[in-house]
Image (cartoon, helix red, strand yellow):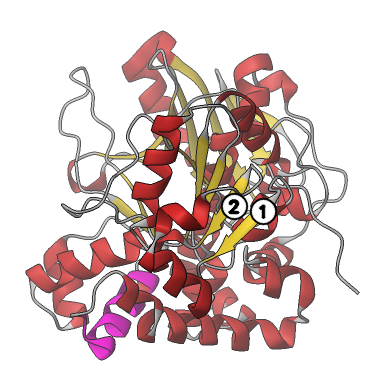
Amino acid sequence: MRAPYLPRLVDPVLRDLLADLPAVMLTGPRATGKTTTAARLARSVVHLDRPEEAAVAAADPDAVLRGREPPVLIDEWQAVPSILGAVKRAIDRDPVPGRFLVTGSARSELAPDLWPGTGRLVRVPLYGLTTRERVGAADRPGLMERIVQGGLDAVEPPADPPDLRGYVTELLTSGFPQPAVHLPPSRREIWLSSYLDQVITRDAATVDHGRDPVKLRRFLETLAVNTAGVVDDATLCRTAGINRRTAQAYEALLTDLSLVDTFPGWWSNRTKRLVQRPKRFLVDAALAAAAVGIDEDGILRDAAVLGRLLETFVAAQVRAELPASRVRARLYHLRTEQGRQEVDILAELPRQDLVALEVKATSAPGRADARHLAWLRDEVGDRFVAGLVLHAGARVFRLDDRIAAVPIACLWS
């Protein structure tokens, strides 16, 4: 019996875009539910992950699309990249809304012989399943939206928040629907380890045929160890045992596969001595733990690992909210020279207003945990909308002007 569909944050976004635009592309890591989500809106499907259909599409992509009832779902476009050209030609002939839904697990579309879709193909990212989606709260406003619209008074304490071990259990649940929803905890690590093997041995080859699987695995493991960290390239290269050029190629490859994301260093001409190195994340905290080979007890014995994985988990929840939110924000991190001031996650709103997040593995944060948020507030003045110290406790309480301690569970409760 098929499991019931869990509504996703992007569902209304896709419906609205298809009502007004001829084509929408749903991007994201493999196995995050793109096909399931898109198929609910499609009337016909081109399965390019099936060799027989892919062979026909490669021979004559225009013919494959002709005559199909719209919306047409083109699943895993990267298996036959020339299909994008056929989509372009079809839209040029008839730009009526709701013609095509395109899904793919790779974002590398800038090769000279590929049409990047500019102006005709609108991209919507679908990230891993968030806790808010998993508990059936996808139709409620997200935390960022509530804060921007109602300020800190709009944040209420969660009814039954987890403790610190509960948060570790939650982050190890994963955002991939198969292990998160359909597998017991004892099988999740096996699934995630198998996923990593497939990424390295098969999926990576769809984007870059020249990679070395052994070196790629080592580099991915290095990124997993340093997830949510601001690490210089030389350290990454030295740890992974590869040169800078190879590291850049592998990072681009993993980014194309939507497995690694970076938050740029925030910059302001009013605030000097800002470090511009990016902060790198694996997109799923449980995947990072599997790559490192650490379990729940191991995470709780290592404060540094706990902090990185908890921030990676929070970043995944916030990242997934933005495509579906009326709050159009970009995500950054902030770090000054020698780490004197750091802000874990910084959301810049369209008018350059800021919402700043600090993630703390404590159940009782104090004013000292908010000192970098207070520094940023004083630096930028009225642009500072709110600062949150996201913590593992149960209470919401004020720490300073426009700064509050907020349980991590407020992201989904």
Task: Judge from the rendering whether residue 236 lies leftward or rightward of residue 29; answer left or right.
Answer: left
Q: Amino acid at mark 2?
A: Leu
Mark 1 or 2, nearer chain start: 1
Nearest the eye: 90 or 300: 90
Q: Is residue 406 magenta?
A: no
Is the N terminus in the top left, top right, bottom left or bottom right quadrant? bottom right
Comparing 216 with 338, the one in front is 216
Residue underneath mark 1:
44
Q: Is residue 9 left or right of residue 100?
A: right
Residues in magenta, as a range = 211-224
Q: Quadrant of the C terminus?
A: top right
Q: Residues within 10 Å of mark 1 (few under 14, many from 20)?
A: some
Taking the spot 52% from the left edge, 80% from the top edge, the residue there is: 195
Q: Which residue is mark 2?
A: 73
Q: Is residue 223 magenta?
A: yes
Kind of residue at badge 1: Ser
Q: Position of residue 392 (x, y in %)?
A: 67, 53
Q: Residue furthest right?
A: 1
The part of the image, by quadrant, that contains residue 90 is top left
Q: Are marks 1 and 2 in contact (CB under 8 Å)?
A: yes
Q: Residue at x 36, y 55 (%)?
A: 107
Left or right: 174 with respect to 181?
left
At a point 48% along the width and 27% down the height, the residue shown is 95
Front-most of residues 14 and 335: 14
Gap between marks 1 and 2, in whole Å?
Answer: 6 Å
Dividing the picture into quadrants, the one containing residue 11 is: top right
Seen in the picture, residue 355 relative to 228 is either above or below; the reply is above
**Would residue 85 be seen by someone viewing this image from the given angle?**
yes
